[in-house]
Image (cartoon, grey):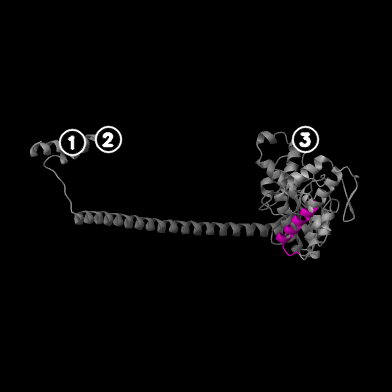
Amino acid sequence: IVSGDWKKTLTNLKVALAQKLTDSLPEKERKNLIESIGPDYVERKSIGEAVAAAQAKEEDFRDEWVRKMEEAAVKRVETEHNLRLAAEHKLVRLQSEAAQQRRERAEELKYREQQLEKISNGDTPVLQQNAIEHPVLGRELLDLGYKRVYLSSAAKLASIPVWEKQRAYRHARAKMIAHDKLKKKSIGLPGVITLFETRTGDLSILDGQHRVGMLTILQQTTSKKTSGLVFDLNEILVEVFPENEKSDEFYAADLFSDINKAEPVKLIDMPGEADTDTLRIINPAADMMENMFPEMFKPNIRCMPPHVNIDNFRMLIFNGGILKRHNIKDSDALVKWILKANDRQEQKYDDALKHWKSGSTDIYYSDDIMVKKYSDRVMNKAIKNGFYLGLDSTWVY
């Protein structure tokens, strides 16, 4: 091939290759690109030119990046400004609402003082027709002086905390009550929810916390399932014992004790029995054990071995004096001690099983204490879950 023919052939090859590689381009761009690699066009760049071109692109990129950062900074400033304005408006609104509540509260207290004066003069309290509504509970039905009665809702009651010395709330118990309530819808809602109110207007649940939990669960349940209940979740009878100038620091505790004298409240939950530090160790430890062995803890206080009820479990620990005897200062240390006791129980029943399976007498002693023989079903569940504390209470001592 002569020199001219060679150049022409090479150009044709380049054009053909470019056509293949540019099939996806728009027709105009494709035509311009193919023409640019014709015989009269050969682009050549030195290294210096390539570096300069690359640096120019980098400079353009940096300028674009700086511009975007500046725009983002301006947007952040605007956002912060808007948030600050919104917070200021919210604060003004809350202050206005708080002032309104204070005015309503003052009017309500004045009204109650008038009612107390009537009662002290021998007048009979009557159902309130135009009473000021309680900011949380709603309309007052009756004022007896020492207590007031309201018709409130499940939603409002769910926002009220449990009295600080009340027994711990157990959701499993509330679920069980809700389940039973849905099975027997015609029973209604016996009793009232009892609240304590401080001089500053703070409310807490003295009695009925698990019924309030049950009501909250029912409120979250579909209307199809709750259809047929003979009571209205927006009409719950509530009694409130207000603190007054004659009340001492033990007023709430005395009320709680009086309410629960006829109910199976554990000694550990009675005011004045277990101090706050003891409860702060025992309650979290019991909760941790329940989380570790959920299949072995039952809400029924009369549950059968190998199960335990958490309140009975707490009571065992309290009555056994474990904290004092073993100098336990926190819940983690108590959990470790309980797990070691569980290991000792496991070894004891493992030895007893070997004794019974060997064909020996059914009577087996461990440390001079007779070990009770259980059915295979009971033992298999204890073994499966690795939990032996519900078989007997000797581990406490």
In x, y percent, where is residue 237?
A: 75, 46
The residue carrying pointer 3 sits among few (fewer than 14), some (14 to 19) or many (20 or more) residues within 10 Å by Cα, namely: few
In x, y percent, where is residue 170?
A: 73, 49
| Residue 91 appears in the rendering | yes
| Residue 144 appears in the rendering | no
Front: mark 2 or 1 = 1
Please, what secondary structure does the residue beneath circle 1 have?
Answer: helix
What amino acid is at disc 2? Answer: Ser
**Mark before the other along the chain sequence, 2 or 1:** 1
Name the quarter where the C terminus is drawn: bottom right
The answer to whether residue 246 is above or below residue 186 is below
Front: mark 3 or 1 = 1
Residue shown at 47%/59% (left/top)? 84
Q: CA distance from mark 2 to mark 1?
A: 19 Å
Residue shown at 78%/42% (left/top)? 380
Instruction: State the residue position of label 1.
Output: 13
Inspect the magenta stretch and tell me whether residue 338 lies in it.
yes
Quarter assignment of residue 273 = bottom right
Q: Which mark is residue 186?
A: 3
Q: Which mark is residue 149?
A: none
The residue carrying pointer 1 sits among few (fewer than 14), some (14 to 19) or many (20 or more) residues within 10 Å by Cα, namely: few
Query: Which of 321/166 is in front?
Result: 321
Q: Which mark is residue 24?
A: 2
What amino acid is at disc 3? Answer: Ser
